[in-house]
Image (spheres, grey):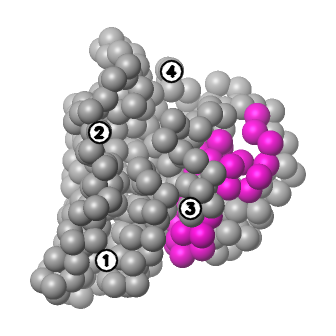
């Protein structure tokens, strides 16, 4: 869906609300999404779910649950008569925050809703995630135009046994069909590993295709945030989904390689900052596949 520049909420610049946590250190969530979406020409309006000193991969963390203030925060936007061209929802620190996301959708009716059901990775739940959390996200997925689970989250949402590698095509077809019974929109399953490649599966209107990028180094925090941010920005600009997925895959591979070369510790995330120029240059060509990172 292409947002008409004359009618978009930001007066010519598409406006994206983003419900996500804010981690001060570790290059993930809002700290990653803000610069990436902004450089792609979309205004970002964050709604914090939690405020953390750093992500939970560190041995200690100072965390503040923002749930008690979220309704007042969002309600003020309504009183100001603001409008939004899309909503991107990432990490929810509490299951009951899913109800607040639904209230946002009812209140502002954004034409595009991307849900990244952040719950787990590599077969393991994040420490704060419960079964209730998963059930709330299943319900929320029914309203998403784009759903971007990683492989672990796709298995959790569909009660499918997880394994890291060795997925047959018919198994992936079944996984996609199960997800499509939860989400009527487009589905992108990220992070499948195959022959030294990361493979992302796109399921849209009953058809499956794949985009791949080289495995450039160790898995790092923030890569899922980069991926969902690029897809959210492109969705508001009417970009082709497959092209957007390939762009995101290539950019993440480039960022991971840069991080390895720069010696950035894994838990400090991906060193994307010097590469925003690459993203901006490749973003400027509408609906074309990005040039491969060198």
Residue at screen point 16% across, 77% down: 76
Residue at screen point 44% across, 47% down: 227
Alpha-carbon distance for marks 1 and 3?
22 Å
Q: Which mark is residue 63?
A: 2
Identify the residue under disc 4: 218
Identify the residue under disc 1: 85
Q: Secondary structure at mark 1?
A: loop
Q: Position of residue 272 (x, y in %)?
A: 29, 33
Quarter in which the C terminus is drawn: top left
Q: Is residue 20 visible?
A: yes
Residue at screen point 54% across, 75% down: 143
- Badge 1 or badge 4: first in the primary sequence: 1
- Above or below for 259 versus 102: above
Residue at screen point 49% across, 58% down: 95
Alpha-carbon distance for marks 2 and 1?
30 Å
Q: Nearer the viewer, mark 2 or mark 4?
A: 2
Res 45 → quadrant: bottom left
Res 60 → quadrant: top left
Res 112 → quadrant: bottom left
Alpha-carbon distance for marks 2 and 4?
27 Å
- Badge 3 or badge 2: first in the primary sequence: 2
Q: Position of residue 142 (x, y in %)?
A: 60, 73
- Label 2 packing within 10 angstroms: few (<14), some (14-19), many (20+): some
Q: Nearer the viewer, mark 4 or mark 3?
A: 3
Q: Nearer the viewer, residue 58 or 282?
A: 58
Asked whether, in this view, residue 147 is left or right of residue 48, the answer is right
């Amino acid at each position: 869906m292409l947002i008409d520049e004359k009618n978009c909420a930001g007066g010519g610049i598409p406006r994206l609300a983003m419900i996500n946590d804010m981690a001060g250190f570790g290059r993930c969530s809002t700290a990653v999404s803000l610069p990436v979406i902004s450089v792609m020409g979309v205004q970002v309006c964050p709604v914090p779910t939690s405020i953390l000193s750093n992500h939970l991969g560190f041995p200690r963390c100072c965390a503040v649950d923002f749930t008690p203030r979220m309704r007042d925060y969002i309600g003020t936007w309504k009183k100001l008569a603001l409008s939004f061209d899309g909503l991107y929802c990432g990490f929810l620190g509490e299951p009951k925050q899913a109800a607040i996301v639904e209230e946002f959708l009812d209140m502002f009716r954004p034409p595009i809703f991307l849900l990244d059901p952040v719950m787990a990775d590599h077969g393991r739940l994040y420490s704060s995630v419960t079964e209730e959390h998963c059930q709330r996200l299943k319900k929320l997925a029914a309203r998403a135009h784009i759903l971007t689970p990683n492989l672990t989250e796709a298995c959790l949402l569909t009660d499918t046994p997880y394994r890291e590698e060795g997925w047959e095509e018919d198994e992936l077809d079944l996984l996609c069909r199960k997800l499509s019974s939860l989400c009527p929109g487009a589905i992108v399953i990220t992070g499948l590993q195959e022959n030294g490649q990361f493979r992302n599966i796109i399921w849209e209107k009953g058809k499956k295709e794949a985009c791949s990028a080289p495995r450039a180094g160790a898995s790092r925090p923030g890569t899922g945030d980069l991926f969902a941010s690029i897809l959210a920005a492109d969705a508001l600009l009417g970009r082709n989904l497959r092209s957007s997925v390939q762009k995101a895959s290539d950019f993440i591979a480039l960022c991971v390689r840069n991080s390895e070369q720069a010696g950035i510790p894994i838990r400090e995330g991906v060193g994307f900052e010097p590469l925003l120029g690459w993203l901006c240059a490749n973003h400027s060509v509408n609906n074309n596949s990005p040039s491969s990172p060198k």
